[in-house]
Every structure is written in C-alpha cells, then in structure tokens.
Amino acid sequence: MTLRARFPDLRHRLEALGLLLLLGPLRLLPIDFSSNLGGWLGRTLGPRLGIARRARRSLSLALPDLSAPDREAILVAMFDNLGRTAFEYPHLGKITDPASGRVTVKDYQLIEAAVTQGRGLILFSGHLANWEVLPLMAAREGLELLSIVRQPNNPYVQGAIDRLRGVAGGQRVGKGAKGARAAIQRLREGGNLALLCDQKMNNGIPTRFFGLPAMSPPAAAQLALRFGAPLVPVRIERLGPARFRLSCLPSLTLPENGRRDDNVQAATQAINDQLEAWIRARPAEWLWLHKRWAKELYATPAPPGRDG
C-alpha cells in the first residue's frame, strides 16, 4: 500500500503544517517588519511565478493603453501588496485594534445611517489592499457581519485561517448553497452581510467590466432588491506597511422600475462600475491573478502595450 493510500489527506496535513510553521515565527516579528518582509518576497518572487502570466494578461485586457513597462510595474506592486497581505495575517488582531491607529475609518456615519433603516445592510467591496481588514474593523465598530467567503480547499488550513479571521468577532460562511441560505436568513432577521463582488462567476449574469464582457455574481444585487437592504460600498486602501484607510460611501441607488431581472442587471453593473473606479485609481492594490474575463481571452497572448 502506498503512503498516499494509507494517508489520503497527507498533502493537506503537510500544507497545514507548513502554514503553521510560517505563521508562528511571523507572529513574533514586529508588525511593520513582517509586512515589509512579505512585500519584499512578493515583489521579488511573484513576477517569476507561472501564475504571473495570468495577471499580465488581465492587465493587458483591462488597461491596454498603458505601456508594457507601466503594466509590469503594476504587476510587481501587486505582488508586493499580496506578500504584505499574507504576512500581515498573524497580526490582524493588532492591526485592527483601534488603539493601534493602523486603520483610519472614514465616513462610518453612512453605515450607521443605513443601519437605522432596520432592514439590514449589505457591505460590498473587492480584493483590494488587505481585504481581510474590512470585516474585522466592522466588528471593532460594533457592526455584526456575516461574511460570505471562499474557503480554502484544505480543511486543516481553513481552521487556521478562520481563527485569524475571527480575532475581532463576526461570522463567516463559505460560498455556495450554504452561504446563500445563511445570507437570506441573516437578512430576514434584519442582520448585515459583507460580500466581495469582484470575481468571475461562470453561472452569474453578463455585465461589463473595464469595457469587456464579464460574468458577474448577482447575489448582492438580488438580496438588496429582495429585502430592500441598503447596498453600501466600502473601500480598503493601503497607506503603508500594515496601515489602511477604510472608506464608506453612500448606498447605491437601486433601480425600482422594469422587470426584476433588469433591475438585478442594472444594480450588478453599478457594483462593477464602482469596483472598476477603485481599481483604476489604485491598480496595484487589486488582485489581478483572477481570471476575471472569458477564458478565451486568456488563450491569446498579451499585446505589448503602447510605446513608452
């Protein structure tokens, strides 16, 4: 009998062990040093990885008017941010502690006003800067959120990540049918949700993103329209090593005329437009590693970009 047959989850256990061996020492490092170390590793190693080809193609699709060197600079900075985000995980509790002063919260009164409507609310954002800061800071501010997240495929890794995500409170549930049921129940009870709406969803609805056709998740729009819940954009920006700004924007105006499907389409497009504006303003802080557009577009090589 092979080792794999005797221990079918051996790979998952080894992956989890590697994660614990990494997180343990990182927890002992000063926060800024840990973030800077992750940034250095990210920008040094990331552009050389095979997955960087996908990010380069995504950049060429979304920002074709930039020169190739400018797009490459964004790619390097994206890997810097991603490395920092990973190495900030063990410090999330301290980073989001209000006493640390590491997260500035701007216009939180917009969320407070939405809460007073008594219909629950839906915060939406994207994989920007360190996106894990959003639900933790909401919990610090006293806003109980149910976050719909993508769970790691490795159940042992999932346990470690869930503990880090839960340092400030709040609840998390995985995407899929279970997450959808939990989201509906939470809004029925007048509770609050947090959703990241920037990833491709193959069985989503057709929209535009950076001017290109893109299948997008309709859940945020569907739930907001069904329950009359305010749909509040919340943006995370990186200000430095383990330092961030969380900005709350006014609730989106939801369409009320036309067929339900048309209203969902319009609201989902409005979400995409908001996300696109944030990404264009700070492209290095978005996770360009997603295959956000049709797979056929990734089968062709990236254009060289304009001269410059």
Image (cartoon, grey):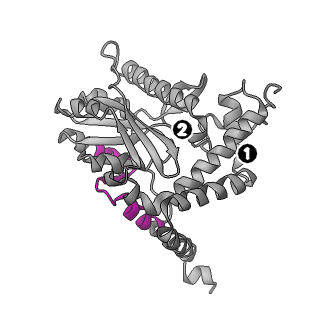
Q: Residue 224: image x %, image y %?
A: 30, 30
Q: Is residue 248 something that shows in the picture?
A: yes
> Which of the 4 image quadrants contains residue 298?
top right
Question: Toward the viewer: 203 or 166?
Answer: 166
Question: Which label belongs to residue 53?
Answer: 1
Q: Which residues are magenta?
A: 157-183
Q: Which residue is mark 2?
A: 200
Considering only vertical position in the picture, is 220 above or below 25?
above
Point 40% across, 18% down: residue: 262
Earlier in the chain: of badge 1 and badge 2, it is 1
Residue type indicated by callout 1: Arg
- Quadrant in which the C terminus is drawn: top right
Point 41% across, 67% down: residue: 159
Point 70% across, 48% down: residue: 52
Point 29% across, 53% down: residue: 170
Residue type indicated by callout 2: Lys
The answer to whether residue 307 is left or right of residue 163 is right
Residue 175 within the segment the image draws in magenta: yes
Residue 32 within the segment the image draws in magenta: no
